[in-house]
Image: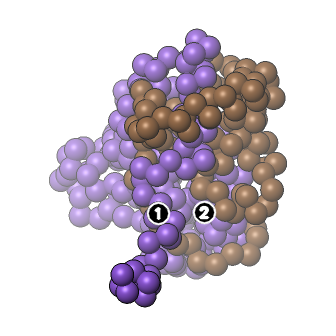
Chain colours: A brown, B purple
Amino acid sequence: MGGLQAGPVERVEHDYQLWEKRVDALMVLLSRKRRFTVDELRKGIESLPGDAYDRLTYYERWISSITSALIHRGTISIEELRAKLADIEQRPDGPKVGTP
Amino acid sequence: MMDNVTHTHEGPDPHAPRPDHDDTLTHHKRLEIAVRELLIEKGILTADEIREAVERMDARGPHLGAKLVAKAWVDPAFKARLVENGSAAAEEAGVQMDQPTRLIVVENTPQVHNLVVCTLCSCYPRMVLGIPPDWYKSRAYRSRAVHEPRAVLAEFGTRLSDDVTVRVHDSTADMRYLVLPMRPAGTDDFDEAKLAALVTRDSMIGVTTL
C-alpha cells in the first residue's frame, strides 16, 4: 500500500462502538494466550478479496480474519459457528444479547 | 375503500432498508458475538477478561504519551533515556507496556521532523496513544505518507521549511514509533502538567507541530 497513488487524507474519526472494542479485545487476549498472532491477523486481512477489503470497515476485516484463523487452527469449527449464528438469529433482542 | 385502492407510497419508501444504526445487527456484529461466545464456552476466554481488556483500552489515550513528552521536556536525563529505550523509560514513568512491542521515541529538532505511518495496516503506539484515529488507517494516509509526506503534512496544516528533513517511520507489529515534538516557545515557566496539556495526539504522530 505504501507508495500507491491516493486522494487527500480525509480526517475522519469516530468513537469506536462497543462491538469494535470487543473485537480488539479478542485480538489482544488471543495473542496473549498464544492462540493467535498478529501475522495471522494480517494474513487473513490480506487474503480478503480486493472488493471485500475496500467494502468492509476496519473491525469487520479484523473479525473476518480472526474467525478464519480460529477455524483454520481448529479452535472452533464451522459447524459450531454456523449453529451459534443460527442461535443468535433467533434471539429477540439481537445485539443486546450476549454482551459481557 | 377508494382511498385504499389509490394508496401510493408518498414520501420515504416504507419498505426501504433500515438505516445502519449502531444497534443494527450486521453480519459482522453477529460474527463477533458468535466467536466471543464460543471462546467463552470453550473456556479459552472469560467474559471478565474481555470486559477488562475493553476497559484497559478505554483507559489508554494520548494523555499517556503527553505525560512522557512533558517529562522529557523538563528532565533532560529522562529524555535521554526515553530516546534510548522508549519502552523502559515509559515503564519507569508509570506507563504500562503490556504488548511485546518496542516503543521507539523519535525526537523532532529544528532540523528534523518525524512522521509516523503504518503502510502495512494500522500499527500504532497504542500503549501511549490509545486506538488510532480512522484517518491513520486510511488508504490515503498509508499510501501517501511515504512518498509525499510534505503534501500530507500540508493537508494537516503543517508547513515545514525546505531545509527541514522529514523522516517517515513505517511502523511494524514489533516497533511502534512516538514522535517527541519540540517544546513550544514561551513555555519556560510551565510546569509538567501544564506542558502535558499542550501536547496533542497529532503532534505525537507527527502530522502537526506545536
Instruction: Say which residue label 2 marks.
Output: B138
Return the disc, 2 or 1, that comes first in the chain's sequence.
Answer: 1
- Name the residue type under label 2: Ser
Q: Above or below — where is B104 with respect to A46?
A: above
Q: Specify whether residue B139 is in view.
A: yes
Point out the image quarter for the N terminus of chain A: bottom right
Instruction: Say which residue label 1 marks.
Output: B18
Q: Which residue is drawn at 34% across and 54% down?
A: B199
Residues B105 and B132: in front is B132
The mark lying in front, picked from 2 and 1, is: 1
Residue B77 position within the rendered picture, expressed as x and y whole percent measured from the top left: 41, 35
Q: Quadrant of residue B59?
A: top left
Point out the image quarter for the C terminus of chain A: top left
Q: Mark 1 lies on which chain?
A: B
Under tag 2, what secondary structure?
loop
Residue B8 position within the rendered picture, expressed as x and y whole percent measured from the top left: 44, 84
* Distance (Cα) linking label 2 and label 1: 27 Å
Residue A96 position within the rendered picture, expressed as x and y whole percent measured from the top left: 40, 37
